Image (cartoon, helix red, strand yellow):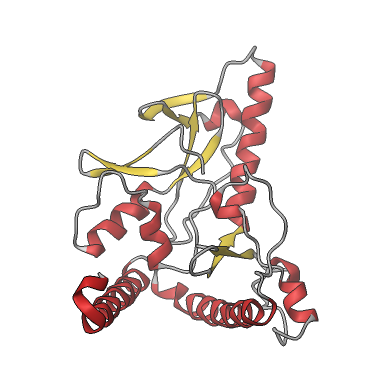
């Protein structure tokens, strides 16, 4: 892009920012029911405040204010912002009420930590419910000589969880993006994930373009909202639809 000169670079950057804003607005209006607009506004303000604090901290300290994680921690759980440090050192006047540290339902975390750190929200309700189903699947597997409570094969190598067999009929999960119910899916080893295919399809339609087949489609949800698709598999564009990949857990 440098070959086009400074003006072309600025124009391209501006167009990308405008496209991201338009997509965000479209998804905020179309993916969220009207009654969820106020929480979305609160999320926007909380993310804005923490982003400013992270930027200031990195500028002053030369580091990112994140908690320790391991190499195998999934991408959407890995770089959790140390809000207590930001508050203690004066970069935040107070920790947002939405944060887990204040009794809320979210962890604040960073994506693109090496290039342009962006603050996002990890929904702990989603994490808890997937973990609840995972525990029941593990119990079933232990009690049935390694067999799984597998229902219909929804995608190649991925199955619905037979909620009656697993004892999870009371566990339901609503999408942070649409408010609609999400399916729990399971691979051949019994690892449980949330299925974001419907949300991703909505994001693809709103983008107005066909995704690259090598692209992890979860990045569309990253770009168009304040939330990350936690407890998910990578998604690829196959047969004109998003398909989760059972061997890409990050």
Q: Is residue 58 visible?
A: yes
Left or right relative to 16: residue 249: right
What number of labels is visible?
0
Note whether 235 is above or below 165 in the view shown.
below
Q: Nearer the viewer, residue 47 or 151?
A: 47
Q: Nearer the viewer, residue 194 or 237?
A: 237
Q: Nearer the viewer, residue 220 or 198?
A: 220
Q: Position of residue 68 (x, y in %)?
A: 72, 56
| Residue drawn at the location 57% of the way across and 16% of the way down | 147
Note whether 187 is above or below 59 in the view shown.
above
Q: Quadrant of residue 135?
A: top right
Q: Position of residue 117 (x, y in %)?
A: 53, 69
Q: Is residue 178 visible?
A: no
| Residue drawn at the location 72% of the way across and 87% of the way down | 93
Note whether 236 is above or below 22 in the view shown.
above
Q: Position of residue 195 (x, y in %)?
A: 44, 44
Q: Quadrant of residue 136?
A: top right
């Amino acid at each position: 892009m440098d070959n086009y000169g400074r003006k072309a670079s600025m124009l391209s950057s501006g167009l990308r920012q405008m496209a991201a804003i338009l997509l965000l607005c479209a998804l905020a209006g179309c993916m969220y029911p009207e009654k969820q607009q106020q929480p979305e506004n609160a999320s926007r303000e909380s993310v804005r405040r923490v982003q400013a604090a992270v930027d200031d901290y990195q500028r002053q300290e030369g580091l990112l204010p994140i908690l320790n994680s391991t190499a195998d921690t999934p991408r959407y759980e890995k770089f959790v912002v140390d809000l207590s440090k930001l508050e203690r050192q004066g970069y935040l006047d107070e920790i947002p009420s939405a944060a887990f540290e204040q009794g809320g339902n979210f962890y604040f975390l960073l994506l693109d930590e090496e290039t342009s750190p962006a603050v996002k929200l990890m929904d702990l309700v989603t994490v808890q419910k997937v973990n609840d189903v995972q525990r029941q699947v593990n119990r079933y597997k232990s009690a049935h000589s390694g067999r799984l409570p597998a229902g219909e094969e929804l995608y190649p190598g991925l199955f619905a969880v037979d909620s009656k067999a697993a004892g999870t009929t009371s566990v339901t999960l609503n999408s942070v993006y649409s408010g609609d119910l999400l399916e729990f899916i399971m691979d051949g080893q019994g690892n449980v994930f949330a299925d974001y295919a419907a949300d991703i399809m909505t994001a693809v339609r709103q983008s107005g373009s066909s995704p690259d087949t090598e692209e992890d489609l979860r990045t569309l949800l990253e770009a168009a909202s304040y939330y990350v698709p936690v407890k998910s598999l990578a998604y690829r564009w196959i047969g004109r639809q998003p398909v989760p990949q059972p061997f890409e857990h990050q």
